[in-house]
Image: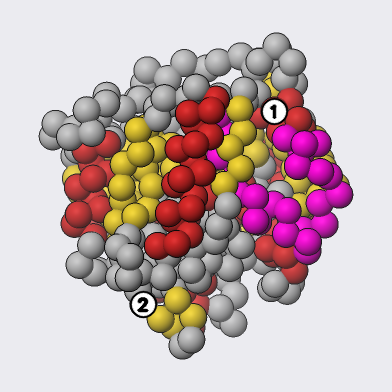
Amino acid sequence: MEHPGKSKNRAGIDPGSPARAQAQPPLAKANSWWPPEWAPQERIWLAWPHRSDLWNGALRQVQYRIARIALLLSRRTTVAFLSSAENCWSQQIQPMLESQAGTVSECRLDAISWNRVATNDIWIRDYGPLCVRRRDGGELWLDFRFNAWGAKYEPWDLDDRATALLAEECAVGRQSFPFVLEGGALETNGSVLLAARDCIFEARRRLDLTESELDQLLRQQLGVAEIIWLPGILPGDDTDGHVDMYIRFANRQQIVMAACDREHPAWPMLREARSHLESRCKEIGQPVQIIDLPLPPVLYQGNRILPRTYANFLISNEQVLVPVYNCSTDESALSIIAQVFNEYTVEAVYAGDLITEGGAIHCLSMPRFL
């Protein structure tokens, strides 16, 4: 379902628009600057799902889902799949795109291509390039190590090498770092960075830096003035607390954050994270409005809570793709996001199959900025 999002914003703050977003130079002491997600994007990368041992027997369904996401994105940007072989592109990806193109208005098949880069899994947000702008305006890709969220899921060797291979194919400068840092653990509005403390400093990530040292490194590489280290892990989240599972900047002064009632198992974690966020924003003089985004009802897969969330949406060139789960809170969540992003096209994408492997739309995508 499509929500044009033109109704009055009850939050009372005019959201930022990619059309109005201005590139900002890094701070005086910074080496480079990481744009916020609403900045103009040149493309979105997706990694093609190919492992039959994942997805509970629904691999083909997930492939069609990812193909549809690519078609939706193609209306406003270019899309490139990471895939290991040309026959995968010609025999799987292209036919699935073509079979669904008639159901996605204004999609552009010619805006979708592929890069010959092999991967283990689809969650490119966590192993793909963090695309920043150097002080001279040139592009640079930051390449951190990846070990499948603290060595949880083997193999991860191809994902760990993906950014290096992609940079070589695209002939883009790359700066590598010898420690693990996942893209889903970071969120920026261009000057303030939200960072997942529990995840980033988890022992199996092999980070040999103190918080103060990493704080300084991130300020230099991402061009942010302040960093807010957020505690806590959303129940069921096997990333150890990625911020893109529960809290997102919508613009420079507005944050969308997951919320629930006291009976929900996420209540203590979200209450602590919100309290810490409000305290730090006040401390650093950052005006912010926090807008509650409901969590879906609790759903178990065996003994595990599925980390269903609406906060894992993707912003891309004046459209927002929002994960939904065919449950009672979908319409409320879509309405809130449409009001916050009232100059954007808001599109619901079913993610009930994606979340069985721990992620949704933001997790499976990575932008390259103009």
Q: Amino acid at mark 1?
A: Arg
Residue 219 marker? 1
Q: Quadrant of residue 123?
A: bottom right
Residue on which the image places disc 2: 299
Q: Which residues are magenta?
A: 192-215
At a point 42% along the width and 20% down the height, the residue shown is 21
Q: Position of residue 277 (x, y in %)?
A: 49, 40
Dot 2: what SS? loop
Q: Is residue 313 visible?
A: no
Residue at point 72%, 59% (across, down): 202
| Rendered position, 288 above or below 69 | above
Residue drawn at x 33%, y 65% is: 262
What coloring was used for the rendering? secondary structure
Q: Residue at x 65, y 56 (%)?
A: 199
Badge 2, how many Cα within 10 Å: few under 14, some, many 20+? few
Locate the N terminus by quadrant: bottom left
Q: Is residue 286 visible?
A: yes
- Which mark is first along the chain, 2 or 1? 1
Left or right: 286, with 8 as reference point: right
Q: Which residue is outermost to the left?
A: 7
